[in-house]
Image (cartoon, rainbow, N blue to C red):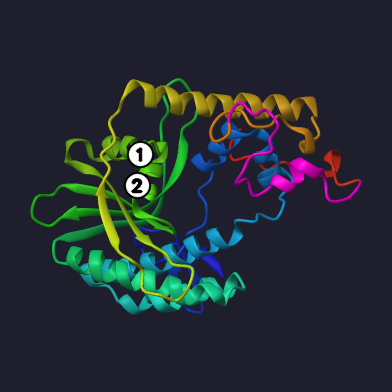
Amino acid sequence: MTSSDSPKAPARLVLHEGRYLPDTGPSRAGWHELADFAVCPQLYAYRYVIHLPDKRKEYFQRGSAFHAGLGASYLRLWARQNDQDPDQFWDSAAAVHHICVAENNLNIERPVQLAVQTYEENVLVPQAAEWNVLGVELEVQAEVEGTEQGITRGIDLVLRSKYTGMVRVLDHKSRSGEIRRIERSYENDMTLDILWRWGMAVYGDNLEGVFLNYVTLPRQAKRPAMVTMELVQTKRSFWREAAIGDTVRYYRGGLRRLLEAGVDPWHWPKLQVGFGAGMGSGICPGCPFLDYCRFGPPREGMASSSLTPEPAAS
């Protein structure tokens, strides 16, 4: 399986068995790695330096399969809109199945297929008549004032109205849980502000907004409860710009100091901000690496010198 852009589609693509599917892998120098470091440098070390198994792995598998299925459907829509052969791309069911096989977890396939079908029926089909596809699973860079480099972020979908020319940037989410709780979790999601900054830089006044579309993803093979379309038009407020810039600077400066000092990655500083802040112990409910903070390395001799950090940016 190799990465390629040969069909000239507006997307990151992977070639598999003669057809293409969207590359839903993480972006380079991505916001999520920076945010992990800002929340807890020890969490960052566990995930990106030591590369410990993540207990949330199935959560990421479901998300990758969901995005691959939707990305495949939008790529086929793009092909039809641009007089291209849609069969050069995998269809959504095949794309979901491929990811589930690659992740060696067929248990998630049925719920994800149902979620993708529900999204297509409620969102994609109505959009097809009014909107042209400009981009699918892109990787973009947003500039951050006061820093030398920008930060990257994956963009799930960019659409332009056939009638007004206005552009929408869309983010797909598949989540388990109660709808109101999910909505609250996105109220202060700075990743949406990054999408807004990029959209304004590229499209200016033609940017209608950033839209967050999410579908409930049941753990069992039941029909998803609903699909909600929520407009999240983030404002370029001073506190958000400051928060994003502070996070980038904290990541780059803090990571450099830890690496230059040769600090054992099993003993990086623990929780700084976010959920459970102020506990200072790193023993935080919900952390997938909780047992490592409680009990230390799984065996003697795994620490430090032989480990090669792979930071998102430097």
Q: Residue 165: x percent and y percent?
A: 13, 49
Which residue is depicted at the point 29% across and 35% down? 234
Residue 183, numbered circle:
2
Q: Is residue 271 magenta?
A: no
Which residue is depicted at the point 52% across and 42% down? 32
Whether residue 57 sits left or right of residue 224 in the image: it is: right
The answer to which of 209 and 167 lies nearer the viewer is 209
- 226 versus 113 height, above or below: above
Which residue is depicted at the point 41% across and 78% down? 93
The answer to which of 297 and 131 lies nearer the viewer is 297
- 291 versus 262 height, above or below: below
Identify the amino acid type marked 1: Glu
Res. 89 in view: no
Extreme residue in the left direction: 163
Disc 1 target residue = 187
- Mark 2 Cα shell of 10 Å, populated few (<14), some (14-19), many (≥20): few
- What is the C-alpha distance between the residues marked 2 and 1? 7 Å
Q: Residue 73: x percent and y percent?
A: 33, 70
Q: Residue 134: x percent and y percent?
A: 27, 56
Region in magenta: 277-300
The answer to which of 75 and 31 lies nearer the viewer is 31
Viewport quadrant of the C terminus? top right
Examine the residues drawn in magenta and state their main secondary structure. loop
